Amino acid sequence: MNSSSANLQPAAVSNLYGHPLPSYLQSDKLGPWGVYLQQVDRVIPYLGHLARWAETLKRPKRALIVDVPIELDNGTIAHFEGYRVQHNTSRGPGKGGVRFHQDVTLSEVMALSAWMSVKNAAVNVPYGGAKGGIRVDPKTLSRGELERMTRRYTSEIGIIIGPTKDIPAPDVNTNEQIMAWMMDTYSMNEGATATGVVTGKPIDLGGSLGRREATGRGVYTVGVEAARHIGMDVSQARVAVQGFGNVGGIAAKLFAQAGARVVAVQDHGGSLYQASGLDVPALLVHVAEHGSVAGFAKAEVIAQEAFWDVDCDILIPAALEQQIHAGNAHRIKARMVIEGANGPTTPEADDILQSRNILVLPDVIANAGGVTVSYFEWVQDFSSFFWSEDEINARLVRIMQDAFAGVWAVAQEKKVSLRTATFIVACTRILRARELRGLYP
Ligand code: GLU
């Protein structure tokens, strides 16, 4: 069914639609982990004496590859390849999502775990960074198969996860139900209900109010902050969104509520354009019913590639990695890119956007709202005392605003991009903790 060898090399990168990316991106063989390493190299000159410890950022602390065999509904046995990588635990337990996707590789999960370390330090939640994944297209599985795969995977990674060790959460193609199965499996193996082992759970199982919308709300919050700094009026802005799931859909809703016009959306099913602004609430209902933006009547269908030429003020890539690359970065018309996805911009594209004076709000701060409310969920589970949604949203907005203000100040002071500034703030926090703890033995 899928390859049995560990995917140690970056796989040929494919875009959102499963098509191979253009040759200039294929040929450099720069997988997500390679992208992350380039980002770290850019920050080392700013770390002062802590640079002595920087090598620790270039090596995941622990990477576990697991075989996940399940019996399919037709009686045959399928094997899936699963991963859990703990990049760094200097500041606290590992924390980060689990994704189910046919293109998941070890390189990708390593990079995603490292971006979690940076993200968690950037918003100053007391976690290290971790990430997990299974190389599978979950759409090909029945509900029963999905549950069996999730439970077996959880059991296999059970040796390294736990409420004080490493706390998974949802990511691409995983949701509250999958978190419920993970929580139950871990609890059954432990012999005690451990709600704090995962976040992003259903409300009835110790989940937090506001968690589902948190990533999109964080994207919107930093977008508004950045717009204020560059004199952009959000209520007049035209917004284009790639990916209309939990992140892109919610961010689009909040921008539209603020008066912005969402002029273009793209997902795995198609690309839509509407100069006067799409009816976002209607589109959300359509996507909930049909699984994609395809077939939404009240918009013009545009070619997949034409999405990058759309005249807009704010572009929100909220799908997968490496969507903005050297081949399309020069076509982008937005003044501001808000990275709802993890790793959507390659380093070459970063440079092109910067030279074109397009402000990039990097993933490691822009999409940190999700893990911030995951932290609130974990705290609530530990104290068995639950907060109101208003309280959660107010705390989320305050954390995002403060983190953004800190990063903005560093970017101004050091004359660096917001990505490098976020890495400076975060890596300094991680390496300070590393230095204080010292090496064992
Ligand atoms: N998967 C989300 C992310 O990439 C959330 C992780 C979490 O809540 O732990 O930030």
Image (cartoon, rainbow, N blue to C red):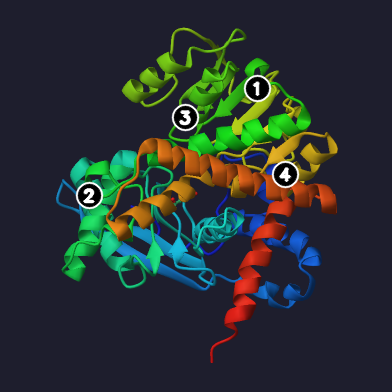
Kindly identify which residue carries mark 1: 234
Q: Residue type at mark 3: give it.
A: Ile
Quarter assignment of residue 325: top right
Q: Residues within 10 Å of mark 2 (few under 14, many from 20)?
A: some
Q: Residue at x 49, y 44 (%)?
A: 395
Instruction: Residue 336: tell me if it is visible.
Output: no
2 and 4 marks in contact (CB < 8 Å) = no
4 and 1 marks in contact (CB < 8 Å) = no
Which of disc 2 and disc 1 is earlier in sequence? 2
User: Where residue 9 appears, x then y in whole percent?
Assistant: 56, 62
The label shown at residue 377 is none
Between the residue at mark 2 and the residue at mark 3, the CA separation in whole angstroms equals 27 Å
Q: Is residue 128 left or right of residue 162?
A: right
* Vertical comparison of 173 with 9: above or below: above
Q: SS at mark 3?
A: helix
Q: Judge by depth and name the residue closer to the eye, 239 or 21.
A: 239
Instruction: Residue 33: tell me if it is visible.
Output: yes
Q: Is residue 70 left or right of residue 160?
A: left
Kindly identify which residue carries mark 4: 24
Between the residue at mark 4 and the residue at mark 1, the CA separation in whole angstroms equals 35 Å
Q: Residues within 10 Å of mark 3 (few under 14, many from 20)?
A: many
1 and 3 marks in contact (CB < 8 Å) = no
Q: Is residue 414 left or right of residue 159?
A: right
